[in-house]
Structures are given as C-alpha cells and as structure tokens.
C-alpha cells in the first residue's frame, strides 16, 4: 500500500477524507449493464467495452507508422504489450511538404492541395500498426494532427548554427541546412497544423488553422479519409483531434487568438468526425489548460446528478474551479507544508521551467493564477470538455516544460515536481467530475539526467542549453529513480482520483532495423553535441524515452491488473 499520508497538497482536505483510511478490502461495484459493444464506448463517466468497464494504462509511440518493416512494428507492439500496457497512442498523420526520397509519409500538403498516400509506404503502414496491435491485445489511440511543426529556416526561429537547429528539434527540407536528425525522429516532425498554414498561402498565423474555413475544410478532408478507413475497426480506442492544440506554436498565432477559437474548432471537427464515425469516442488531446474567467461557448447548465455509488470519492463535493478557490487552496497547501518543513527542518526552492510550451504574454489575462489556469495557452479545457461530441476528457503532465502553479518554497525541487504533477491531475479530474464524462491523463513524462542530451525543447534559450545562466534558475533533471518515483506517484494520484486511462510518454524500442532516411535512428547519446549522428537500431528518443524499460514495466504491472479491470475501488 502506498498511501503514505494524507494528500499533503492542493485538495488535501477533500482527498484526505476520501482516501486516507486504510483500505484492506476492495469495494466491488456491480458491472454496468448497458448495451454491450465491441467498440470502446462512453457511458456516463465510464468507458465500456464488451459489456464491462474499461480502463487503460498506455504508452506513446508516435513513430510507429514510420517503421519500415512489419517485423519492427510487431516487435515494438509485442514489447509494449509484454510491459503490461493495454493501449498505445500514435500519430495517424505524417504530413510532408515535398515527397521524400525514402521513408514513409501519409499526406502531401503542397501549395494548397492535399494528396493522401495509400501505398505501401503510406497508409498501409498504419493499417499494419492497427492490425498488429490487435494481435498483441492493444487498443490504439489515434491522434489526427499536431500543434507543433517547426522549420528553422522558414518559421520565426532564427537558426544561428547547426547545433541550435538540432536543439530546436526542427528539420528543414532545404538542402544544406545541416539538420541531420532523420525525418520523423521528433514528434513535432510529422507535419501538422503549421504545415497547412505554410502551404495554403494565407496569413502565416498558427490560428488560421483554427479559424480559416479553407484550412478547416482541408483538415476535414484529411480526417474524412483517415476516419472512414478505420471507422469500423474495434481496435481503435478513440480519435484524438490533435496533439497539444493551442494558440502558441512554431508559427506565431495572431494576437487575436483566444481559447474560444480553439474550442469552436474542436466542436466543428468533433462533429465532422462523429458524423463519419459514430462508433468511436472523440477526445481532444490538449494538455488540460484551464481558463477560469473565460466566457464559455458550451456553458455547464445543470449540476450532474449525485453519484449513486457508495464509492468514497463520490462523496466529495463537486465544485467548479474558480479563481478564488484555486488561490485559497494554494494558500492552505503552502501553509501546511511550511508547518511540516518547520517541524522537520527541511526546506527547498523549486523553480523550474524548461520552456517548450511557453505562452505569449500578450494573451495572458493576468488573473494571478498562472498560465495553466488563466487562458494564456488559448485552451479552455472545461469548455472543450462540455462539447457534446467530446466523449473523453484529456490532460497531460509534463512539469519539465509547463508551469502548473507556483512552486512550494517549503519543498525540495524534486518534491515540487511531483507535487505540481499531482495537483494538476487533481485539478483536471475535479473539473471532469462536473461533467460526468470519463477523463484520462493522455500523456505524462519526466526527462532524466541521462536523457538530457536527447531532450530538445523548443526554447533553447533555457537552461541547460542557455549560454546565459541568468535566464532561468534551473533545478537538475530527475535521476532515473526519481523519474520512476514520480511516475508511480502520478499514476497513483490518477487512479485514486478516478481517471479512466493514463498514457506514458514515450516508449523506446531497441532492436529495430536501421534504414537510411528513416527515424531509425540516430545515436542520441551524441546529440546534440555532434551534428554527425550515426545510425543505431533504437527508436527515437526525444528525452522521454527510457533505454531500460524494466523499471517502467514493473510499476505498470504493479497497477495494471487491478486498474485495467477495475469495477469498483482499487486498492493501491
Ligand atoms: C472485447 O471483445 C473483443 C472481441 O471478442 C476482443 O478482441 C477484445 O479483446 C475484448 N476487449 C477486452 C478489453 O476484453
Ligand atoms: C521485443 O523486441 C525484441 C527486439 O528488440 C524482439 O526480439 C522480441 O521478440 C520482442 N518481444 C516480443 C514479445 O515481441
Ligand atoms: C500554386 O498554386 C497556384 C494556384 O493554385 C498556382 O498559380 C501556382 O503556380 C502554384 N505554385 C506552384 C509552385 O506550384
Ligand atoms: C477536399 O476534397 C474534395 C472532395 O474530395 C476535393 O474536391 C478538394 O479538392 C479537397 N480539398 C483539398 C484542399 O485537397
Ligand atoms: C513571434 O512571437 C515572439 C514572442 O511573442 C516574438 O518575439 C516574435 O517577434 C514573433 N515573431 C514574428 C515573426 O512575429
Ligand atoms: C553547415 O555546416 C557546415 C560545416 O559545419 C557550415 O560550414 C555551414 O555554414 C553550415 N550551413 C548552414 C546553412 O548552417
Ligand atoms: C484563409 O486562407 C486562405 C488560404 O490560405 C487565404 O487565401 C485567405 O486569405 C485566408 N482568409 C483570411 C480571412 O485570412
Ligand atoms: C461500417 O459498417 C457499417 C455496418 O456494417 C456500414 O454500414 C458502414 O458503411 C461501414 N463504414 C465504413 C466507413 O466502412
Ligand atoms: C521528497 O520526496 C522524497 C521522494 O519521494 C520523499 O522521500 C521525501 O520525504 C519528500 N520530502 C518532503 C519534504 O516531502
Ligand atoms: C524562451 O525562454 C526565455 C526564458 O524564459 C524567454 O525569455 C523567451 O521569451 C522564450 N522564447 C520563446 C520563443 O518562447
Ligand atoms: C535513400 O535510400 C538510398 C538507398 O538505401 C540511399 O542511398 C539514399 O542515401 C537515401 N536517401 C536519403 C535522403 O536518405
């Protein structure tokens, strides 16, 4: 049992009451009776399949459809399944702006036209991924596009040397740009929203993708083809509209980009997908950013009915996240840790941010809550969650790159990292309770010290890459043991809070076939110190992959049996 003490943090009172009591026996809730379907469906705040509730622990392998051989895909999915996961999240897009000489691609976006590649190095690779996932008992979560797609020489980013291009994690197709990371190595190198913006010749503003009908139609064209292809496939868990959709991106948004534009886009595209494919759930794929003071396009009209079950967590009161509540709970949590720190003589300073997902100050509403809560990112997850066609809530936990709130000055840096993640999980799960839909942690990860060299944040002016150490005080990256400790605590927080799914970011697979012009694979231990990258046989590692997957697998297997088959409360 890992409940070491009361939840020390943001929602301490509520969570303490709910969970601190020792749970020696499992409460078993009778199986839901509902229409039995071979598709994963949403029923109230549950996911159901084959007449039973379905929960998942998954991992991300965005590069799956870019693997060259069926055997490589088979090995990877076999290893993921063996590690205890039951879901794999992957990109269902691979946009290029010119047809590459080698390797796979799914869609050519060029000068305002789209062309889908249905050939053996196109959608047939994705077909194979889905087919082999079934063989290994894995459900597959398909993401339809990406918010990020930097191109150093053509976007807003000034590339001063080849090394900085590597660190920016971008790849330019222009010959001679010295960007030697293979195409598709980084998750942001599969095209996405900014590829449409670049190739449709309109204003070079990221939010054109959300607001311009020409681009919306183009994206709908793409989704039509992908979604209809797999609409009847029971192995697809759900459609994720985009990875990280938000105003900020590799191409700047216009100054008028606001959360409602991103919400409206979700509504529009979700309706489109649901029309083509009523079988599958539609999710967002955003990081869970809130906007407490934003006017809503989809206001919550009635309070959800009280939950009939005797589950402990159901007894918690359901309150909306307001500015006042957040500030009050933060203050109380700090007070508590200060008292504890005083007692034990410990203290800490925990200021960290490595800055991939920095939001632009102009959009900040400055409500004193911080960018994760005030709409700075151009995302209002509450408003998106209440779109009728969105059947599954999502949020992510990446404290190396996102600041979720003020650090607690009474805690050591690593504890702040863990706490920020836990508080963020609780904020999102609590929000989800207002709507009575399932909610999932669709990405979580922590960069480790051995992985620092492979970590490529968008913003290379931030330590550890910054030449100017005054830029941002940095705490060290986590050790391998700390990473696993954090993962364990976050997963536990998620399970206790009542999430329906959790997805690790990202899987790293050894023993693959290295081929030129493919993601397989530079020796990341040499990046970014050497532009002369040699090829190895490991899948991409963007700083979140683990060379040794055994510790990860052991925590997954610790939680998986109870959680994946959970009918009632899980003992952890
Ligand atoms: C649901 O049933 C299908 C078909 O029998 C099976 O392939 C799948 O594994 C089942 N899913 C779960 C989660 O048991
Ligand atoms: C795991 O991957 C390796 C290649 O790295 C492969 O040899 C092995 O068969 C895979 N295991 C399973 C269960 O698929
Ligand atoms: C792009 O498309 C426009 C109109 O559709 C056409 O006039 C132009 O020649 C095209 N440019 C290229 C480089 O193909
Ligand atoms: C979208 O699809 C329609 C019908 O297939 C086609 O006429 C149109 O050209 C496509 N749009 C783009 C931008 O490719
Ligand atoms: C993009 O936004 C950044 C941050 O606000 C700003 O410094 C930069 O000048 C902008 N670039 C362009 C091309 O507008
Ligand atoms: C590419 O690298 C070579 C050798 O380091 C350098 O001379 C050249 O200026 C670089 N080109 C660009 C576009 O960065
Ligand atoms: C919308 O996009 C099209 C194609 O990129 C462009 O020609 C048009 O100017 C854009 N409209 C607005 C209002 O920006
Ligand atoms: C899915 O199956 C249904 C019922 O068999 C069929 O009517 C529909 O056309 C199929 N959809 C696609 C996109 O294949
Ligand atoms: C910090 O975290 C470590 C590892 O999880 C734990 O052992 C320690 O008690 C924590 N310290 C405080 C002050 O919470
Ligand atoms: C990068 O981070 C630095 C330091 O936090 C910040 O001043 C700068 O605005 C960031 N740049 C971008 C493009 O976000
Ligand atoms: C494409 O593959 C061929 C044959 O393996 C190789 O010679 C060539 O260098 C590759 N091209 C690129 C751009 O990687």
Image: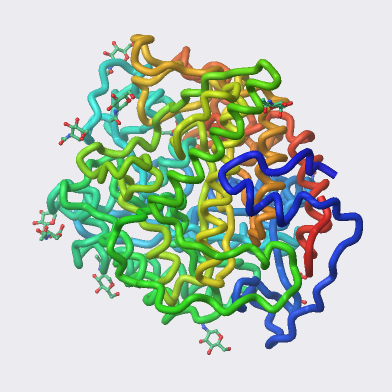
- Ligand 10 quadrant assignment: top left
Quadrant including the N terminus: top right
Using the rendered image of the protein, determine whether residue 549 is visible from the camera's viewpoint: yes
Using the rendered image of the protein, determine whether residue 523 is visible from the camera's viewpoint: no
Residue 218 image point, x, y percent: 27, 65
- Direction from residue 388 to residue 422 in the image, left or right: right
Q: Residue at image x 71%, y 54%? A: 17
Residue 186 image point, x, y percent: 47, 36
Occupied quadrant, residue 223: bottom left
- Direction from residue 108 to residue 233 in the image, left or right: right
Q: Residue at image x 23%, y 51%? A: 197
Say how the picture is coloured: rainbow
Determine the residue located farthest toward the bottom in the rendered image. 35
Q: State whether residue 404 is above or below residue 305.
A: above
Occupied quadrant, residue 316: bottom right
Q: Nearer the viewer, residue 72 or 154?
A: 154
Q: Nearer the viewer, residue 80 or 94?
A: 80
Q: Residue at image x 65%, y 39%? A: 8
Q: Residue at image x 40%, y 23%? A: 167
Residue 181 image point, x, y percent: 44, 28
Count the marks: how many? 0
Q: Nearer the viewer, residue 370 or 141?
A: 370
- Direction from residue 287 to residue 77 in the image, left or right: right
Q: State whether residue 243 is above or below residue 332.
A: below
Q: State whether residue 209 is above or below residue 348.
A: below
Residue 261 image point, x, y percent: 26, 61
């Amino acid at each position: 049992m890992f409940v070491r003490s009361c939840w020390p943090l943001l929602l301490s009172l509520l969570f303490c009451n709910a969970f601190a009591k020792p749970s020696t026996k499992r409460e078993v809730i009778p199986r839901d009776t509902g229409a039995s379907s071979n598709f994963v469906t949403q029923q109230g705040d549950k996911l159901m399949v084959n007449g039973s509730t379905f929960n998942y622990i998954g991992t991300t392998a965005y590069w799956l459809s870019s693997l060259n051989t069926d055997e490589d895909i088979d090995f990877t999915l076999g290893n993921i399944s063996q590690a205890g996961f039951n879901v794999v999240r992957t990109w269902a897009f691979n946009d290029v702006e010119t047809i590459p000489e080698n390797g796979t691609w799914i869609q050519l976006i060029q000068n305002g036209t789209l062309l889908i590649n249905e050939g053996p190095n196109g959608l047939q690779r994705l077909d194979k991924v889905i087919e082999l996932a079934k063989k290994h008992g894995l459900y597959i979560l398909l993401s339809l596009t990406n918010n990020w797609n930097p191109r150093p020489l053509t976007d807003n980013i000034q590339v001063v040397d080849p090394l900085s291009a590597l660190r920016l994690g971008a790849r330019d197709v222009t010959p001679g740009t010295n960007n030697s990371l293979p195409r598709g190595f980084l998750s942001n190198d599969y095209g996405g929203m900014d590829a449409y913006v670049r190739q449709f010749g309109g204003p070079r503003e990221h939010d054109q993708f959300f607001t311009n009908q020409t681009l919306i139609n183009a994206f709908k064209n793409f989704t039509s083809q992908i979604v209809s292809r797999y609409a009847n496939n029971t192995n697809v868990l759900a459609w994720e509209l985009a990875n990280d959709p938000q105003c900020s991106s590799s191409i700047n948004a216009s100054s008028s980009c606001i959360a409602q534009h991103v919400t409206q886009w979700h509504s529009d595209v979700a309706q489109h997908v649901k029309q083509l494919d009523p079988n599958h759930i539609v999710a967002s794929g955003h990081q869970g950013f809130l906007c407490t003071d934003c006017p809503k396009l989809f206001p919550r009209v009635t309070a959800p009915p009280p939950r009939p079950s005797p589950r402990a967590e159901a007894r918690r009161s359901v309150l909306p996240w307001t500015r006042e509540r957040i500030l009050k709970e933060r203050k109380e949590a700090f007070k508590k840790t200060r008292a504890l720190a005083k007692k034990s003589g410990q203290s800490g300073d925990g200021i960290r941010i490595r800055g991939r997902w920095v939001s632009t100050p102009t959009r900040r509403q400055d409500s004193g809550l911080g960018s994760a809560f005030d709409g700075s990112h151009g995302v209002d997850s509450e408003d998106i969650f209440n779109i009728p066609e969105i059947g599954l809530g999502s949020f992510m936990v990446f404290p190396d790159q996102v600041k979720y709130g003020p650090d607690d000055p009474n805690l050591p840096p690593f504890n702040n990292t863990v706490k920020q993640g836990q508080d963020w999980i609780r904020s999102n799960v609590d929000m989800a309770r207002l709507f009575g839909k399932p909610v999932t942690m669709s990405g979580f990860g922590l960069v480790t010290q051995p992985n620092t060299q492979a970590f490529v944040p968008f913003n290379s002016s931030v330590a550890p890459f910054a030449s100017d150490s005054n830029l941002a005080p940095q705490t060290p990256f986590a050790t391998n043991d700390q990473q696993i400790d954090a993962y364990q605590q976050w997963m536990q927080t998620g399970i206790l809070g009542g999430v329906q799914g959790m997805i690790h970011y990202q899987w790293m697979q050894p023993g693959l076939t290295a081929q030129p012009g493919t993601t397989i694979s530079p020796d990341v231990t040499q990046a970014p110190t050497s532009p002369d990258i040699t090829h190895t046989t490991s899948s991409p590692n963007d700083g979140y992959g683990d060379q040794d997957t055994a510790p990860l697998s052991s925590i997954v297997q610790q939680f998986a049996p109870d959680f994946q088959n959970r009918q009632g409360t899980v003992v952890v």
